[in-house]
Image: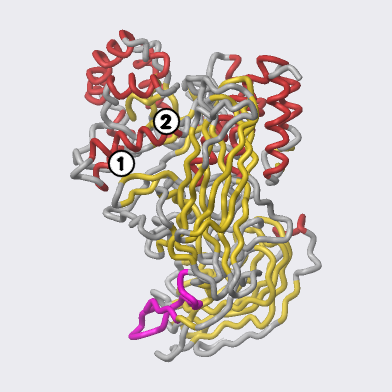
Amino acid sequence: MKAGVSVLAVVCSMAAMAATDIAKMRWSRAFTYDKPDKTPVVFEGWSRSEKASASDYCLWLDVHYADGTKQWAVRSDFSAGTHGWEHVRDLWIPAKPVEKIEFFAFLRKGTGTAEFRDLKLERREPSAAEFFGSVRRTDRPFIDADEIEGFAYKNGHKVPRSVSVAGRSGPVSSLAPDAFRVWVADSMRRVTPLTFPGSNEVSTIDLELARGEAESAQIVVSTGERCEWTRGNLVCSPLKRRDGTPFRGKVVWQRVGYLARRPGYAPHPEGVADVERWFADPLLPAAPFRVRKGGSQGLWVTATADRAEKPGVYTGEISVLNGDQEVSRIPVNLQVRSFAQPTTFGMPTAFCVMDGFTRAQYPDRYEAMRRQSWDLMLDHRLNPDDISRTTPPPIADLLYARSRGMNRFNILNLVPPPKDPNARWVCYSSPEETETPAFYDYVKQTLTSYVAELRRHDLVKYAYLYGFDEREKRYYPGIDRLWKQLKADFPDVPLMTTAMMYRDMAEGKDYPCLETTDWYCPLSSVYRPELSAKLRAQGKQVWWYTCCGPHHPYANMASYEYPPIEGRLLGWMTHLYRADGLLFWHVNFWGRNQNLDPSDTFFPKWNTYSGLRMPGDGIFLYPTTEGIVPGIRLAQMRDAVEDYERLQLAAARVGPHAVDAVSRTLVTSMTEFTRDPAALRAARAKLARLIEGE
C-alpha cells in the first residue's frame, strides 16, 4: 500500500463473546507503506458496550518505523460501563517515517462485552479547522453547559482545545423545575452533584456506634431546574435519651466539595457515567452553602460518641435552613453500644503524611499545618506516618501521637540524606549509594542515640525502619547485608519493605536473600494467605498495601472512581486475611501552591491526576487557604479501622471462626465482595450483638 490516504470502514461485533473469552476479544488490521513518511494518522471508530471494565477498551495502534524501531500503544479510549454508540476520533503525529501500522479495536484485560463499527484509519494532513475530541462532559450544575475536550492540528503539532456547547448531557433533575428535596444517603454511597433522589430515599439519620466511635451520614439537598439556594445551613438540636440523659459526644457537619473529573482513568463498572464531571471528596468546614439549579449538594454529618457515653438510643433533629427559613427537619437516632473502641488503635497502619509536601505548601506556617495534618490523621484513627522520612520524628511528637492512639511509626527511610534539604520526597536510592560503609556509618550514627531515647520512653515497641520501596532482585544482596548489620546493632527495631521479595516467593522463585526481611508488605493483589502464614510461623509479619494499584476487581480506595465502600471494606479484608497492617503511600501528594478556596464547593481547576492514572491517588487530605481538611476517602478509612477493631473485640469474645463467618457475608474472595452499604451495616450490628453477648 502506498503512503497517503488509507481508509478502512468495517462493522465488528463482539457482543456474542463470553466474558471468559475477553482476552481474545479484539479486531485488527495491518497497513504497510511502500514509501515510509511522517504523514499524520487519523483514526476513529464507534463502540457500544455492556458492563465493560477493562484495562484496554480502546482503539490501539502499534507502529513500526522504517528504521526498525517500534512504538506501541498509541490509543484512544472508549468509556467504561454500559453505554450506547460512542464515537472516538484521534490524531497521532509520527516522530519518524512509518513503515507499518497495526490497527486494533480492543476489549481485553477485564470483563464485559462490546461492539465496534465504522473503524477508520487515514494518513493525511488535517485541516486547521478540524477538531479531535472524544470526551464530552457536562459542567452542570456548576455551569449550565457541556464541554468537549480535544485538540486541533496546527503547524505540525496538536494544540489543546475545548468546545463549550449548550446541552443536557447526563442526569437531569427528577424534581419539578421550582421544587427541591432534602434527603439522606449512607456515608458509603457515592453522591455526585447530578445524583438525584429516587422514590425510596430516606429522610432520617439512623446510626449505630460504640463508645469512642464515629459514624457519618449524608444529608443531600437536590433542586429542580429553576430552583437555587444561596444561603443554606444546618442546625443540630441537642440529642437525648428517653430518660433525659444528654448525648456527651458531638455531632458536626461539613460541606462536601467537588473536584473536576476526566473520564477514562481507572474506570470502574460501578462508577458514575463518564459524562459526569465531578468527584466528591473534600470535606469543607461548616458554612452557609449554595445549591445550584438542577443539582445536588452533599452535607456530611458525623456523630462521635464519648468514651463515657451511657448506652442507649439518643434522638434529636437537624434543621435544614434556606436563608432564615427552616424548610426541613431530619430526625436523628443514635444507638450507642455498651462497649468502647480501644484507646490505642487496634489496626496497624502506615498512611503517609509527608512533611516535605506540607512545608512546600505552607512555608510561612509549616509547624502549625504539620500539627494540623497529624491531628487529622489521629482523628481518623490512622498513624501520622511517613515511610519516606529522612530525619527521625521528634520524640515529643511521638509522645503526643501515642497519647491519641498511635500504634506504629517509621523511624527512617533507608536512603542517604537528601542533597536538597527542602526536597519534598525521597523514595529510594541506587544500590551503589546504600551498599557502602559510609552509608551504614550514617545510618548507625543517626539511630544510636535516637533508638536509646525511644527505649527510655517505651516507644521502640511501635517503631520500625523502612527501605527499598518496590525494589527488585538486584537490591536483594544489599538488603541482606544491611539488615544483618542493623539486626546486630538494633535487634529490637524491625525492617519493613515493599521490595519484591514477597512477590518472588509467591511466584515460586528461589533467589538468595528472599527471607531476610522482618516485615513484608506486598501489594494487596499479590498477598497470599498460605505464604503469609508460613512467614508468620517464622516470627515475621506480612502487611499489605494499595496505591495506584491494584485495579478492579480488587478493592482499592486510591481512586475517586472506585465506590467509597471499597476503602471501608479493606478493614474487613485486613482482618479476614490476617494481614498484619495496611500501608498507603501518601495522603498529601499536593502540587505546589494549589490551595482550595473553601468559599465555594466546586473546584474546576484542582489537579486530581498528578501524572497518575489513578485519579486522587495520594490525596486524602486537602490544602485550603484556611488550613488542611480531610476527604471522604479518609473518613472511609477511619470507619475501616473502627470496623477492624470491632472485629477484634468480637473475636476476643466468641473466637475468630465465628467472626470470620460474619466477614464472609461481605467478602467471598479478594475479588468478590459486596458493595451494598446495608449489608455492611447489618454485619456491624451482628458483631455488636456478639460482643455484648446477645
Classified by dominant secondary structure, the portion drawn in magenta counts as strand
Q: Residue 480 location in percent, x, y?
A: 41, 22
**Residue found farthest to the top:** 456
- Whether residue 623 is visible: yes
The type of residue carrying mark 2 is Leu
Instruction: Answer left or right for 170 relative to 515.
Output: right
Quarter of the picture containing the N terminus is bottom right
Instruction: Report the mark closest to the observer, 2 or 1.
Output: 2
Instruction: Answer left or right for 431 relative to 99.
Output: left
Q: Residues within 10 Å of mark 2 (few under 14, many from 20)?
A: some
Which range of residues does the magenta coloring cover? 142-163
Where is 356 relative to 497, above or below?
below
Cα distance, mark 2 to mark 1? 22 Å
Q: Residue at x 41, y 26 (%)?
A: 477
Where is 370 relative to 81, above or below?
above
Residue designated by label 1: 425
**What's the mark number on residue 378?**
2
Q: Residue at x 71, y 33 (%)?
A: 683
Instruction: Find residue 67 and report its image quarter.
Output: bottom left
Mark 2 or mark 1, earlier in chain: 2
In terms of depth relative to the viewer, which is nearer, 456 or 245?
245
In terms of depth relative to the viewer, which is nearer, 675 or 200?
200
Q: Residue 602 location in percent, x, y?
A: 43, 62
Instruction: Answer left or right for 318 relative to 409.
Output: right
